[in-house]
Structure formats: structure tokens, C-alpha cells
Image (cartoon, rainbow, N blue to C red):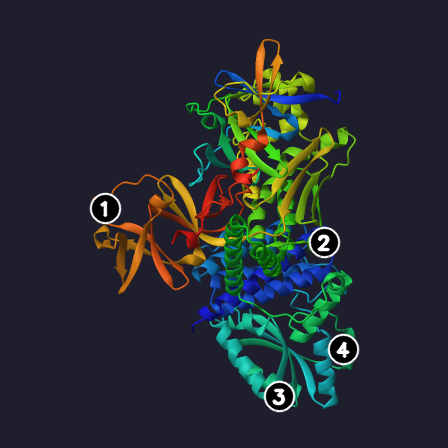
Amino acid sequence: MAANQKQYVIFQIENDEYGADINKVTIIERMLNITRVPKTPPYIKGVINLRGDIIPVMDLRTRFFLPEREADDNTRIIIIDISGISYGIIVDSVVEVLQFEESSIESVSGFTSNVSLDYISGVAKSGERLITLLNLEKLVSEFTNV
Amino acid sequence: MDISQYLNIFVEESKEHLQDLNTSLLELEKDPGNISILNEIFRVAHTLKGMAGTMGYTKMSNLTHKMEDVLDGLRNSRIQVSSDVVDVLFKCLDALESYVGIVSTTGNEGEEDYSEIVEFLSEILDKSKGTKGTDNKENKTFTEDKNNHLKLELNEYDKNVIENAFGQSLNVYQIYVELDQKCLLKAARAFIIFQILEKNSDIIKSVPPVNDIEDEKFDYYFTVIVISKYDKEFFTKELNSVSEVRKVEITEITRNHLGNIRHAPDTDVKRSEEKETKHVMKDSSQKSAEKKLSSKTVRVDIERLDVLMNLVSELIIIKTRLDGLISDNGDRECAQTIESLERVTTSLHDAVMKVRMVPVETVFNRFPRMVRDISRELGKDIELHMSGVETELDRTVIDEIGDPLIHILRNSADHGIEKPEERISRGKDKTGNIWLRAYQAGNNVIIEVDDDGAGIDIDKVRRKILEKGLESEEIINGLTDEEIIQYLFMPNFSTSDKITDLSGRGVGLDVVKTKIEALGGNVELISKRGQGSKTIIRLPLTLAIIQALLVMVGTEKYAIPLNSIREIYNLNPQDIKFVRNQEVTVLRDTVIPIIRLHDVLDIEREPDGNKKSLTCVIVKKGEKLSGLIVDSLINQQEIVIKSLGKLLSGIRCIAGATILGDGNVALILDVNSIV
């Protein structure tokens, strides 16, 4: 892979496609039992037991102000790790892994979407598809004071 | 006689002896001719018989008595050591273990009298009565042929005593007494004879032993050796004058006899001599070399250790809370002080944890027997090699790790190791090997179960996944072998075509995984087709463990540290009053505030309505008491505290999380921040 190529795990929420930097993705799991944790923001669904570790899990639908939906066979939890901090994000389905030239990733100023601009690190195109690339650090900045 | 105070000692010591018995029987199987092992086993059985007798456990005592008889026959070669005999002895061992188990829970030995096993033992004894044993002088004790002189076994002790007697110019006689076959009360007759003998001499030996004679466990003759100042004629006259005595044969024992009379292994010896021989044997097996040098030690009640452990664990929870609060605050000096506190608490925790460490040997030592039994059951030849048995693990982990290991070992034996013919046809040694290793690596203890069997059939697993409809074919083909193996850990997954007693139900591996994760560790399975499989269990050395009460609030489970709990109280809703807008109740003249956990945890609750009582957990914070209302109590158990992670550690009211036995997470309440 050339130095200025970046790989992203592409997943779907509602009808939109998003990408997560593959370097920060640890593993993709099927839906697991989530234990609710009180006194947390509504988009934190709770914690899961991932092979002995307790990992908090975020519902991206709620995070992006979309209506909640029952999990089905396609629902996945993507475990993210940013500098030692782990958390999971619940997505409708995981599609594939795509590679983008860094130069072809566009910045977001001037964009409108239902996702707060803070969480978007850029937008990439794949043929006709528009992939919103997420800023995984900002997603949990409320907790980490980033 | 009130023996209940001795129950604990009885159970503890019996367990130790039974463990010795177990090890010795295994050794005996490998080395059937070894007299010293037989003697060791005999000694243990004898001790157990005495212990059981003292405690009044007649069934246990009867069983051990029969065992003794058989063992006696074995070491005198009247009975040959065969695998059947060893099997029966193992069955006796199992029966004894079960007796001890019942004793430890109920105080009695229970109702089982294991008549089958006693039958087997009797059969073996009966068969032996036909044989005369070897002609070898060294091994024979006495012949059953009553016409010859009965020459008794004399051990070193006896000989010394006799030598002494000679030194004092006393007479030593071997007296053989035969009672009338029609004699009804043999024991009473014998008693009279013994009285006469005791009045006029010292009895230094009796065959059968005095106890057996008192219990009437002898045919109609017995032999004693006595030392007396009286002479042969005196005794002949005295004894013959007792009615129902048919024959008295007195042989004077002289120095010549001491040379002739065969050596016999020590049976009834002074305790110190017994210990000496034990030590000698242990040295020769190099056990003493491996035992740690005894340093000064203190015996500590397990309960006291638990109290210490709980206090330290609570300290850690409080420190974690403090940590969260201070970092919000931002005060530098506070932060530094907290760091120092953290260092000290961690060291304290480590020190206390070390006290709870137990070598894995205590769990591993039952495996050789288990593997032996399984291999016989399956018709396979399997040898278990263990190493690192001195590696230490926390006491709670030790308690929990046994079952998962049994399951993994059974898997290796059942699915892994092939039958001898198959192994040979594959160019392997007909004996299958399982290696069980324990060692410390960094902050973890690793336990490996390695076998040189057939390995996991990955394709079979792929097919099973397809069959069960878990994944589509494309995805299955895209998965690596390692990822395929992960499916074996799913509930109800088994590639076995048939279910055996041992495995194949597909229940085991997922339970193994859950249990090990609940202990804070993980499991890995590696396999090479045709070569074998290896299971690696990683367990953390340091665990934060506390005793907790699990409760239901709504549909959610929460854990309340036991240390914070004063008592549980069934509160009548009518007794809840209001003081300045706060719900309170009066408990034995004290007013305590009531806190509804539903409200604290944002859980919907039903109104009290007509409920007769509410479950109220009275907790204490320093001197202050409060009552927490929950929906119901689940149980009390030790839990491993896991951190919620950096993201959620600042949450009020929640001190951490724990993984329950079913793999789900339960949150631990921070009582101090709730009240």
C-alpha cells in the first residue's frame, strides 16, 4: 500500500455510509448483551463483556439523532481503540474495507448533514457512493476532554 | 462422647491421607512389585481405620478393615497385584472419599455401606486362601497349615524387645492356642486366656491382633509371643485348665530363633519409627529435596484472611472514587497525594493477595487419576505429564479453575488422542501424551494443556458452522483457521457425531470460556491437524476480589459490596414515614433514611401499593446507616472487580463492574456516593 493511501472500514447507518480508520479498529463483533450503565448520556447504551474486558458501547444512531432500531443479524459492534481507550460503536451493518488516496479525501467545511460537523474528519468518494469518514476521537471527547 | 469438635481435624487429616492413598495407588499400578508402596498404602488404610473407629464411623471402619486385609495379603504375596485388584482398591478410595465428603457436610458417614465393594474385597480374600503365597522365605509370614509350627513374623522392634528379655534372664515363648471348634463365645474364651497371660507375662505380639480377637475376627486359633519369668510348664498347665481349649502348643524362643525368624515389614510400630521410614522413602523419591525449607510460619484462619482481603478491596474502591473526584477537581497537590495513596494501596493489595496464593498442585493432583480412569474407559493409552505444579494462583481462582481444566483434559482424551491402533497406523507412539504445564509470565499465570493427538478437524468445523446456519458459505471460506476455531467456544457447538458421557454435548467449551473470563483471564485454542492441540489459559495474577450481594433492581442486576452491608430487612411500606421530605423508617429505635435504588439508577418502579414488604438492604457508611430498597436479593458471591474503563470511570454511584458466571456484566454500586 502506498504511503498516502488510507484504509477505512465502511459501515452503514440508515441509508448512509460511513468509514472508520482501520488503524483504530480492533475488531468487529456481532451484537452482544449490553448492560445498561445509569447516569450516562443516552447514546451510551452500556457496557459489554468482550473476552473478559469491560468495553463501553455507543449507539451511533442515537448519537446522530436517528431513531433507534432493533438489532438484527447484520448489526455489528465495531471496537475502536484510540491510544489505549477502547469503546464500541453499534452500526446497522458492516459493508467492506475501502482504500482512499489521502488527497482525494475532501474536508467538510460547507457541508450540511445530520451529523455534527465535529465528528466528521472528511468525506470520500467511491464511484457514486459518498462515504462520511468519522473522527473517532471526537466521538468520545465528552469523556476524554480532547 | 461429643466428637463434633474433632470433625474438622478428622476431615482435614482424612483428606490428606486419601490424597496419599491416591498417589500411592497410582505408583503401585506402575510398579506392582514394590513392597514399600504396599506398606505405605497399608499404613494409610490402617490409620484411616483407626480414625474412623474413633469417630464411630462403623461403615467406614469396616471398609478400611477389609482393605487392610487385602493389603496385608498383597504385601505378603498371598494375593497378586493385578489391575483388577488395583481397580477395586481405587473403588475403595472413591468410597472413602465419598464418606469423608458426607462427614464434612453432615457429621455422619451417611447410609451407604458399599456392600458391593466389600464383596469384591471378600472375593479377593477368598481366592487367596487357596494359595500359599511364594515359597520365598523373605515374603512368607506364616503357613496356613496348622500342623506345622507357626512361625510368626518378628520385626526389628520385636527382636529388640526379645533381646532385652534375654538380657534380663526372662523366658520368651511362642504360645499357640487352639479353641474347641464348638466353642460359642470365642472372644470371651480368648479374653480369659489373655487375662491369664497378662497376669503372668508381657504379651509382645499377637496374631491375629488383639483387636481382631476381641471382635471375634479369628478362626478358632491364635498365636501370641510372651515374655515371662514363669516357665513353659506353668503356662501349659494354666492354659489347658481353661475350658473349651483344645490345644496349647508352647515353643520357647531362643537366640537361634531370632536368627531364623524372618524379617517382616513394620506393621504396628512406634510412631517415631513410622515417621522415620516415611522420611526415608520420601528422600529416596527426592520429595524432600523439592519441598521448601521450612521457615517460620503462622497458621491463619481463612476467615481472617477474607476479612483482610475485603478491607483492602474496599480501600481500593474508595481510592478509585477519590481518583475520579480529584482529577475532576484539578488540584495538583491533591493529585500527587492520590498517586502516593495509589502506590501504597496497590502494594497493600499485592501483599494481601500473596497471602491468598495456593499452588496449583492442589487442583492438579487429582488429574493423574482422572486421566487414568478415562483412558481405561475409552480403551486408549494416555499418559499425563505435569509440570510447574508449584506455580501459585489466588485461592478463588484455584477453586474455579478445576472444572474448566477437567473439561479441557477430557476433550484431549476423548477427541484429541486417537486409539492405539490408529496412532500406530499414523506412525505415532501408541501411548498418547497430554502435557499440563503451569508457569508464570509477567503479571499472568499461564496454564497449558497440550496433546499429541489428532488435532482439530477445521473442515469439520466449517461444515458444522454451515450446517447450523451461523454464517454464509462465502464468509466461512474467508475466515482463517484461527477464526474458525473461535466457533468452538460458542454455546451448543460440537462436532461430535455422538454424545458420550464425557463430551459431545457442546456445552463445555463455552462454559470454560465464560468461567475463565469471569476470573479475568482468557482462553486460546491452537491446533495442528494430525499433530495435536494446545489450549492456553491466561489468568491475571492480581485480582481485585470482594464479597458482594447481588440484587435485582427492576430487570437489572447490581452488586453491593458485602462489607458495606449491615443487614437485610423486610420493610413494611407502611413503616416508611417522611421527615423533611426524605423517606425514613425507624429500625430498633434509630431513624434511618430510605433510598430507593430505582430512583438513583433511573429505573422505573412500581408504586408500593399493596406490597406487604419491601426488601431493604441496610448499609453503613462510617457510623451512618441507610436503607436501600431493591426488588429482590439474588445471592452472595465473590466477584472480581473490573474497571469500567477510562471513559466511564467518573460515573457517580458505580464503582466498577464484574462479569457474572453467565458472562453478563453486573455493575458494582458505590455505596459511599449513594448515601
Of pointers 1 and 3, the one earlier in the residue sequence:
3
In front of the other: label 4 or label 2?
A: 2
Using the numbered discs, state the Cα–Cα distance from disc 3 to disc 4 in whole angstroms: 23 Å
Q: Picture coordinates of residue B612 (x, y %)?
A: 23, 49
Identify which residue, B644 or B282, lies in the foreground: B644
Which residue is the site of mark 4? B258
User: Do the residues indicated by labels 4 and 2 lie within the same chain of the protein?
Assistant: yes
Look at the numbered disc 3 and give the secondary structure of its residue.
helix
Q: Which amino acid type is marked by label 1?
A: Lys
Which residue is the site of mark 3? B234
Q: Chain of mark 4?
A: B
Using the numbered discs, state the Cα–Cα distance from disc 4 to disc 2 in whole angstroms: 30 Å
Which residue is the site of mark 1? B611
Q: Which amino acid type is marked by label 4?
A: Leu
Of pointers 4 and 2, the one earlier in the residue sequence:
2
In front of the other: label 1 or label 2?
A: 1
Asked if residue A30 shows in the view, the reply is no
Look at the numbered disc 2 and give the secondary structure of its residue.
loop
Look at the numbered disc 1 and give the secondary structure of its residue.
loop
Label disc, if present, on residue B555 of the rendered structure: none
User: Do the residues indicated by labels 1 and 3 lie within the same chain of the protein?
Assistant: yes
Label disc, if present, on residue B32 of the rendered structure: 2
Dots 4, 2 in contact, CB < 8 A:
no
Q: Picture coordinates of residue B308 (x, y %)?
A: 53, 63
Local packing at callout 4 (Cα closer than 10 Å; few below 14, some 14-19, many 20+) is some
Local packing at callout 1 (Cα closer than 10 Å; few below 14, some 14-19, many 20+) is few
